[in-house]
Amino acid sequence: MVRLSRATLSRVAPAARPLAEPRATGVVHLGIGAFHRAHQAVYTERAMAATGDDRWGICGASQRSADVADRLRPQDCLYGVRAGDEVRVVGSVRDVLTPCDDLAARLAAPETAVVTLTITEKAYRRDPLPGAIGRLVAGPPTAIGRRAAGPPTAIGRLVAGLRARAAADAGPLTVVSCDNLPGNGATLARLVAELCEPPLLEWVEENVAFPATMVDRIVPATTQADLDDMAARLGVTDLGAVVTEPFTQWVIEDSFAGDRPAWEKAGALLVGDVRPYEHMKLRLLNGGHSAIAYLSGAAHVSEAVGDPAFAGFLRRLMDDDLSPTLDGLDGFDLAGYKETLLARFADPGLRHRVAQIAMDGSQKLPQRLLDPARDRLAGGHEPRWIALAVAGWMRHVTTSRELDDPLADRLRGDGTASAAATVSRLLAIEEVFGADLRESRVFRELVTDCLERLNADGVPAALRALDAS
Ligand code: CS2
């Protein structure tokens, strides 16, 4: 079968062809994985189609490997997105850079007005070692598994690009973090500022905006079966295909330094304050996901929520412990949101592996489950469902044979320690729990209790016991 490209597009059904053909590259994206291709790239293409403003082609960049470039470049950067039964080739990506290509030159080009990022939570981590955000630094015994004097990090590369842009006097830039972090825009702005020396720092303050965003679309890692299915649907081979769900959401703080795609014409919500949406999504969706990842024992999310007892637990987690921590959502149908969420999790068409969600838990737990636990504790409540999920994570990190987490060396246990000892050891990791949760007697007891039950009786019995208590 021939490969998807501009030359072979005529073989694709007209309804599945791209909506737009950009004539310039106004957007640079760092971290061009499946999520970006199914989310921001789709919004950007729709915005171009809705307005006829075709300046917003995307130049994607990968941080670690040339894999996406190798897949997309031979296809003129075209790829298919399947959402439910709907399939369409997306045409907004114009180029993909490998880690060896000159990203700084792209960021310094006057036609670039917007940079978006999906570099994952761990890329924003403030390493205890000086300079670690700018460069990948020493491996063990510093325990973050990176090489000494390695290549720059994503944020280091962004700063190099800002330096080049300032030197070229190429105009203002908006840098949009699309990672699942609280206050992602402000966090990124702070990390960038830490790497900027004074003249550059002033230029950044005057010329660069870092709006906050909430992004949402479930995008499982593409499998060979997905590629085969896409080829059958399109009639051409597509090695860049992604499979996702029909649902999609993007809320963006309306704070830009200059020109931008009309994303609101593609369904994005531009608002003054993203925080209420961000908390709702990070806590209910991502918090729910992490609870599934560490407790369900299922291979896929849909199987986990197919178990009525487990679905019941998710409802209690959301209703009792997570929803009460949300505010600023007056008039918003939160009950409907939660129902939709459970239906999205149950989607049998999405083969979403829980192992994909389980990775990097140390970077995900704080915003998903620990911040809401803090809120509940501060109000004098006992977040027992959250405590169960946290105990599930503790059991996961101490018993998994292959732990995928930047703090893996510090998390792993020998599996023989008592629940109380394990909880003490892990609560002492301040990057994850802060000093406050370590010191909270209520939290420690709740988690210890849950871990004891999980170890002794397993998940179903622990759920029943919590339900009865
Ligand atoms: C998931 C997210 O892998 C994970 O940790 O919770 O990727 C989730 O699917 C997205 O945030 C959905 O918008």
Image (cartoon, grey):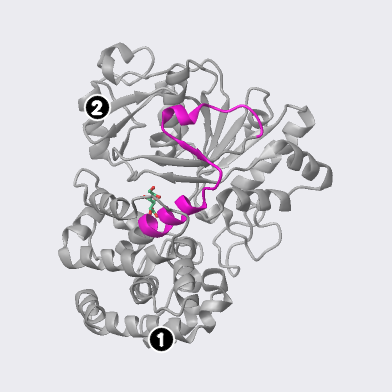
Q: Residue at x 56, y 50 (%)?
A: 184
Give the percent coordinates (x, y) of residue 64.
52, 44
Q: Amino acid at mark 1?
A: Glu
Query: Which label is found at residue 109?
Result: none
- Determine whether 199 is above or below 20 in the image: below
Residue identifier under label 1: 445
- Residue 387 vs 191, above or below: the answer is below
Work out which quarter of the rendered image holds the N terminus and state it: top left
Q: Residue furthest right?
A: 199
Residue 223 placement, left or right of 277? left
- In this view of the protein, can residue 12 be seen by the observer? no
Magenta span: 257-286
Q: Earlier in the sequence, mark 2 or mark 1?
A: 2
Magenta stretch encompasses residue 160: no
Q: Name the element at disc 2.
A: helix
Place residue 412 in its image quadrant. Answer: bottom left
Visible in this render: residue 253? yes
Which image quadrant for residue 386? bottom left
Residues tagged 2 and 1 counted as in contact (Cβ below 8 A): no
Amino acid bearing label 2? Ala
| Residue occupying image coordinates x 47% and y 87% | 441
Measure the alpha-carbon separation of dots 2 and 1.
53 Å
Q: Which residue is mark 2?
A: 231
Secondary structure type for disc 1: helix
Which residue lies at the image location 83% right of the left edge and 42% below the top edge? 199
Image coords of residue 311 (percent x, y): 22, 63
Q: Few, some or many C-alpha atoms within 10 Å of disc 1 (few <14, some 14-19, many ≥20)?
A: some
* Quarter of the rendering occupied by the C terminus: bottom left
* 85 left or right, relative to 196: left
Q: In this rendered view, identify the residue nearer to me: 9 or 13.
A: 13
280 drawn magenta: yes
Q: Is 118 rendered above or below residue 236?
A: below
